[in-house]
Image (tube, rainbow, N blue to C red):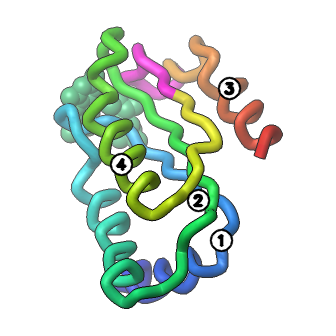
């Protein structure tokens, strides 16, 4: 509930919005989706949220990059609808257990993305 009320003003103020989420069942986890859905209040409320930048950091267990389509495509389409420019995406497969991310380029790519914004 706290997030529900704090998120819309935070989005209004932000220059860049970075979505970070794992893949759950080929999709955006319900908890994260509930937060993202709050953005709709700004759209229907006619707020000017165009011109922001947007980025995505995600991971999944499987090695197939298309597994992350269920996260990547909704974020890209939401960005397009809101006239947000995609500043970058970090998509990391092969991550299941604690520490797996350290065996990938994920953290370096996320840092590179942050430095590029
Ligand atoms: C409920 C649940 C569903 C998942 N579904 C998928 C999936 O469909 N495909 C996949 O490759 N990995 C899947 N995973 C693996 C997660 O994407 C991966 O373990 C991620 O690192 C979990 O991040 P978390 O520890 O922040 O929850 C799933 C994990 C959980 C817990």
Q: Disc 1 or disc 3, which is closer to the eye?
A: 1
Mark 1 beta carbon near ligand 1 (under 8 Å): no
Q: Disc 4 or disc 1, which is closer to the eye?
A: 4
Q: How many marks?
A: 4
Classify 10 Å Cα crowding around label 1: few (below 14), some (14-19), many (20 and above).
few
Which residue in the protein does label 4 denote? 77
Q: Disc 4 or disc 2, which is closer to the eye?
A: 4
Q: Main secondary structure of the magenta part?
A: loop
Which residue in the protein does label 2 denote? 17
Q: Residue 14: which numbered mark, if any?
A: 1
Q: Quadrant of residue 33?
A: bottom left
| 92 within the magenta span | yes
Which residue in the protein does label 3 denote? 109
Q: Secondary structure at mark 3?
A: helix
Q: Quadrant of ligand 1?
A: top left
Q: Foreground residue, 103 or 19?
A: 19
Q: Quadrant of residue 110?
A: top right
Report the span colored magenta. 91-99
Is 42 placed above or below 31 here? below
Counting residues from the start of the chain, the first of labels 4 and 1 encountered is 1
Q: Secondary structure at mark 1?
A: loop
Classify 10 Å Cα crowding around label 2: few (below 14), some (14-19), many (20 and above).
some
> Residue visible at 32% across and 75% down?
40
Is 45 placed above or below 74 here? below
Q: Foreground residue, 19 or 16?
A: 16
Q: Residue 95: which numbered mark, if any?
A: none
Counting residues from the start of the chain, the first of labels 1 and 3 encountered is 1
């Amino acid at each position: 509930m706290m997030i529900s009320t704090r998120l819309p003003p935070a989005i209004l103020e932000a220059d860049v919005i970075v979505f970070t989420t794992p893949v759950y069942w080929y999709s955006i986890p319900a908890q994260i989706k509930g937060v993202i859905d709050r953005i709709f209040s700004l759209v229907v409320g006619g707020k000017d949220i165009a011109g922001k930048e947007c980025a995505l950091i995600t991971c999944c267990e499987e090695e197939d990059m298309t597994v992350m389509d269920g996260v990547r495509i909704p974020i890209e389409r939401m960005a397009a609808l809101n006239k947000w420019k995609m500043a970058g995406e970090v998509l990391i497969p092969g991550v299941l257990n604690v520490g797996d991310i350290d065996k990938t380029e994920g953290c370096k790519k996320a840092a590179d993305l942050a430095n590029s914004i």
